[in-house]
Image (cartoon, helix red, strand yellow):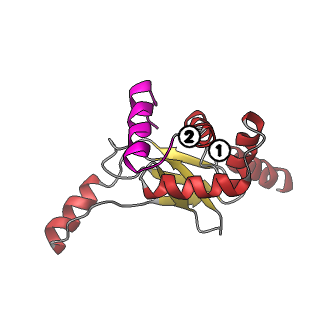
């Protein structure tokens, strides 16, 4: 996860203006919520709940349309965890590839893997298959630390 500083925020605002979008109070609030919730992988509904605390007059349709615009401009990325619910996260230009995710199949928690684990695999693929890789996405499904601990405790109690 990358720390967002004022220069990154200014770049995002410039990208919005360059994309022909006005910096409306609603869009700025939505952007601020996304930045403050960095690493949370928010659904539209979760984002809306957070936005309406700050700007109650903002409707869910506004949040939805704004996220779609942010996605088109490359400000956010859509994350599909194969559960029928899309989540959104800030897109970092400095990341060569999207980061990897650990997805708990018990509680739904999503954790980011800090390191790019596939550099050597990419080199083999590019050399062997003459395939130029532009990006990749990797998700691991299993149990988070807490759910694993709870499952282990349940097994020990029933043994």
Looking at this rendering, what residue extends furthest in the right direction?
A: 158
Q: Nearer the viewer, residue 100 or 51?
A: 51
The image shows residue 55, relative to residue 99, as above or below, that is above
Name the quadrant containing residue 24.
Answer: top right
Residue 15 visible here: yes
Q: Nearer the viewer, residue 136 or 68?
A: 68
Q: Position of residue 152 (x, y in %)?
A: 73, 50
Q: Which residues are magenta?
A: 1-22
Q: Secondary structure at mark 2?
A: helix
Tag count: 2
Which numbered disc flags the more N-terminal residue, 1 or 2?
2
Is 42 positioned to the left or the right of 73 in the image?
Answer: right
Q: Position of residue 11 (x, y in %)?
A: 38, 36
Mark number for residue 31?
2
Q: Check the picture and name the quadrant holding the C terminus.
A: bottom right
Q: Nearer the viewer, residue 106 or 37?
A: 37
Q: Determine the residue positioned at 70% across, 44% down.
A: 146
**Residue denoted by label 1:** 145
Q: Determine the residue positioned at 44% across, 60% down.
A: 138
Q: Secondary structure at mark 1?
A: helix
Q: Nearer the viewer, residue 132 or 125?
A: 132
Is 50 positioned to the left or the right of 79 in the image?
Answer: right
For label 1, the crowd category at 10 Å Cα-Cα, with few meaning under 14, some 14 to 19 and many 20 or more, is: few
């Amino acid at each position: 996860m990358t720390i967002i500083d004022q220069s990154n925020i200014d770049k995002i605002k410039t990208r919005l203006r360059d994309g022909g979008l006005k910096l409306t109070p609603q869009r700025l609030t939505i952007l601020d919520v996304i930045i403050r919730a960095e690493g949370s992988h928010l659904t539209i509904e979760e984002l809306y709940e957070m936005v309406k605390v700050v700007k109650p007059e903002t409707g869910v349709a506004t949040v939805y349309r704004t996220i779609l615009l942010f996605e088109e401009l490359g400000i956010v990325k859509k994350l599909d965890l194969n559960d029928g619910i899309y989540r959104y996260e800030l897109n970092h230009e400095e990341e060569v590839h999207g980061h990897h995710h650990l997805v708990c199949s018990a509680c739904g928690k999503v954790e980011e893997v800090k390191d790019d684990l596939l550099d050597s695999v990419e080199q083999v693929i590019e050399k062997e298959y003459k395939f130029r890789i532009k990006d990749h996405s990797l998700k691991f499904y299993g149990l988070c630390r807490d759910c694993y601990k709870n499952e282990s405790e349940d097994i020990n109690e029933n043994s």
